[in-house]
Amino acid sequence: MRGSVGVGRLLMAGVLVWAAAGCSSVVEGAAEPASGQEGLFDPCKDIPDSVLEEVGLDPATEEVDIAGVEQPGWKICGWSGSW
């Protein structure tokens, strides 16, 4: 029993050393902040008026953002319809 506890501790120590060795790395260069805006789907621009009309929405009722307040990282657009 005493031998198996020693083997268990040795095994645990080996796992901890292996895990700690994988935590450090060197990366060359400088970080560049991502704007998050490139490639972001914008329903106000990306959905054609013809599609809105097809589903019963009026393109003239377009409302941008939430109560006119921009939501960073999101492009929000809403329309009203007769249904």
Image (cartoon, rainbow, N blue to C red):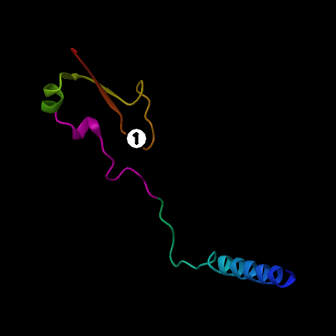
Indicate left or right for 25 with 68 as reference. Answer: right
Magenta span contains residue 47: yes
Q: Residue at x 15, y 25 (%)?
A: 53
Residue 19 placement (x, y as % from top left):
66, 76
- Numbered range of the magenta stretch: 34-48
Question: Magenta-highlighted stretch: main secondary structure?
Answer: loop
Q: Residue at x 71, y 81 (%)?
A: 17
Which quarter shows the C terminus? top left
Q: Nearer the viewer, residue 43 or 23?
A: 23
Q: Secondary structure at mark 1?
A: loop
Residue farthest front in this picture = 1
Residue farthest right in this picture = 2
Magenta span contains residue 43: yes
Which quarter shows the N terminus? bottom right
Amino acid carrying mark 1 in the image: Trp
Residue 23 placement (x, y as % from top left):
63, 75
Dot 1, crowdedness within 10 Å: few (<14), some or many (≥20)? few
Q: Residue at x 36, y 39 (%)?
A: 75
Position of residue 68 relative to residue 7, above or below, is above
Q: Residue 48: name its quadrant.
A: top left
Residue 49 placement (x, y as % from top left):
16, 31
Would you name the residue on which mark 1 appears?
A: 74
Residue 37 placement (x, y as % from top left):
37, 50
Residue farthest top in this picture = 82
Q: Residue 60: name its quadrant.
A: top left
